[in-house]
């Protein structure tokens, strides 16, 4: 049974994360409301395109290293300074290479001057984020309050700097600089407080790099596939149509992104239980999976119906009359979020059972389908075609994870009866 101190720690961390998510949601919503009205459809599309474009390179910049570092430090706490120091040197070196690669791609794609310069500037966020690797110590030590408070500071500072740029009448490059400055200051604060718990020993250690990368590469590839599924539609819309379509799609995407925070936070609590049951009790794991899908479905389906019916009203209230056409995209795109709610438990369960490669194959299929459907539908339907492609992709991921879970987890006559009371008793125990 978990001791009182551990229970208090878990409750505190959960509450802190919920509060941080709530603040981030409100600031993100306020930022979108102001910027959509200030920038208009096309320039709002440009602003969001910067994030979509950078998302690919951010996934390469991390490539699963942080997750493996957390795992290794949790196993070998005495080597924390050595491991973080060695991987910090690797991540900084890697980030500089990725920045150069990003700039080359930007130059080759021949964007408009304003968008090109904004992308050039925002690419500098890569080494800033790489330098935040010591923050993994907060996760290892269950110090959730540190990243939560720093994250809130980052969002607030970024919001204030962006509003300053709006008030001064500045454009896209100034806004990219504002976000970059907020991230840089947050990095300095992160490093300052991380040094209370760990003082990294900077060094080049190719042997350790190879050891960490051998485990992180599957996670990195999966992260890149997720980036493709979630953001390649922005790139293809800009290439195949225009920034007006990107702007309308951005408005719909902002709404669904906010809705997706909830299941991600829920899985942050459920995944550790899945990992425990995967090695101890497949009966409990089976029940936990079924119940998580059931309850997330209870939230997702009414949400999907409600958003579908109210999409035009939601878009008008949040983004203004000039974005009214985005309601058609939101009516479709919200169903990708419904399928995400339903698929998330299966994906996490496969990882908890050490079936990362199966999860990777499902995501790879999703990438192929998504790109193929975007090529087919974007020229015909514009951003609505991109939304429909995303829905079909997530429905396939849901079906794929469900089939894989049924195969690897199997069925049991004890799914109901004895297992459910055992599961419920443990949940009550953990909550208390």
Image (spheres, rainbow, N blue to C red):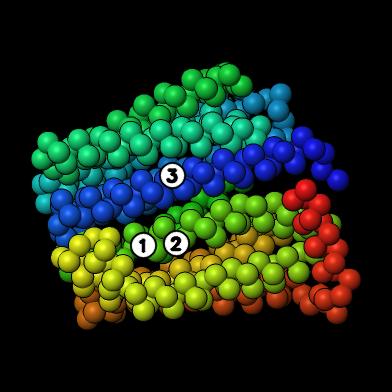
| Up/down of 300 relative to 8, above or below | below
Does residue 203 sit above or below 256 in this rendering? above
In percent of width and height, residue 428 lies at 79, 55
Marks 3 and 1, Cα distance to the nearest angstrom? Answer: 16 Å
Residue at x-position 66% and y-position 66%: 292
Horizontal and vertical percent for residue 53?
30, 52
| Residue 109 falls in image quadrant | bottom left
The residue drawn where x is 51% and y is 37% is 148
Q: Which residue is mark 1?
A: 255
At a point 81% along the width and 52% down the height, the residue shown is 429
Q: CA distance from mark 1 to mark 2?
A: 7 Å
One can see residue 196 in this view: yes
- Place of residue 225 in the rendered image (x, y in percent of width and height, measured from the top left): 46, 60
**The N terminus lies in which quarter of the figure?**
top right
Helix, strand or loop for disc 1: helix
In the depicted structure, whether residue 49 falls above or below residue 11? below
248 or 208, nearer to the observer: 248
Circle 3 sits on which residue? 23
Q: Earlier in the sequence, mark 3 or mark 2?
A: 3
Residue with the mark numbered 2? 259
Q: Is residue 207 visible?
A: no
């Amino acid at each position: 049974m978990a001791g009182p101190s551990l229970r208090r720690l878990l409750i505190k961390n959960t509450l802190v994360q919920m509060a941080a998510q709530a603040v981030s949601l409100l600031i993100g919503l306020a930022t979108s409301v102001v910027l959509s009205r200030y920038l208009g459809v096309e320039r709002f599309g440009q602003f969001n395109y910067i994030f979509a474009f950078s998302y690919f390179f951010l996934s390469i910049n991390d490539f699963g290293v942080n997750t493996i570092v957390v795992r290794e430090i949790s196993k070998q706490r005495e080597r924390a300074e050595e491991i973080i120091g060695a991987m910090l040197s690797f991540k900084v070196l890697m980030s500089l290479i990725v920045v150069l690669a990003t700039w080359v791609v930007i130059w080759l794609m021949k964007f408009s001057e304003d968008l090109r310069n904004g992308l050039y500037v925002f690419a500098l966020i890569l080494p800033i984020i790489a330098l935040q690797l010591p923050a993994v110590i907060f996760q290892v030590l269950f110090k959730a309050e540190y990243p939560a408070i720093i994250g809130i500071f980052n969002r607030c500072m970024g919001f204030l700097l962006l509003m300053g740029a709006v008030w001064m009448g500045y454009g896209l490059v100034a806004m990219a600089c504002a976000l970059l400055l907020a991230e840089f200051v947050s990095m300095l604060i992160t490093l300052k407080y991380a040094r209370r718990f760990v003082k990294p020993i900077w060094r080049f250690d190719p042997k350790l790099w190879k050891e960490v990368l051998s485990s992180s590469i599957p996670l990195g590839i999966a992260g890149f596939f997720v980036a493709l599924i979630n953001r390649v539609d922005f790139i293809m819309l800009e290439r195949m149509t225009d920034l007006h379509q990107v702007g309308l799609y951005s408005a719909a995407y902002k709404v669904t992104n906010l809705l997706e925070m909830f299941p991600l936070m829920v899985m942050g609590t459920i995944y550790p239980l899945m990992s425990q049951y995967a090695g101890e009790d497949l009966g409990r794991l089976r029940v936990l999976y079924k119940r998580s899908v059931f309850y997330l479905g209870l939230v997702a389906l009414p949400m999907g119906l409600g958003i579908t019916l109210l999409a035009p009203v939601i878009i008008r209230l949040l983004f203004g009359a000039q974005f009214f056409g985005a309601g058609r995209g939101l009516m479709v795109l919200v169903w990708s979020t419904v399928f995400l709610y339903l698929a998330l438990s299966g994906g996490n369960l496969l990882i908890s059972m050490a079936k990362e490669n199966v999860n990777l194959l499902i995501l790879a299929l999703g990438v192929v389908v998504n790109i193929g459907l975007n090529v087919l539908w974007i020229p015909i339907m514009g951003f609505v075609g991109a939304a429909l492609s995303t829905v079909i992709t997530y429905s396939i991921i849901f079906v794929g994870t469900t089939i894989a879970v049924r195969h690897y987890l199997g069925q049991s006559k004890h799914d109901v009866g004895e297992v459910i009371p055992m599961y419920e008793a443990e949940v009550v125990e953990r909550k208390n």
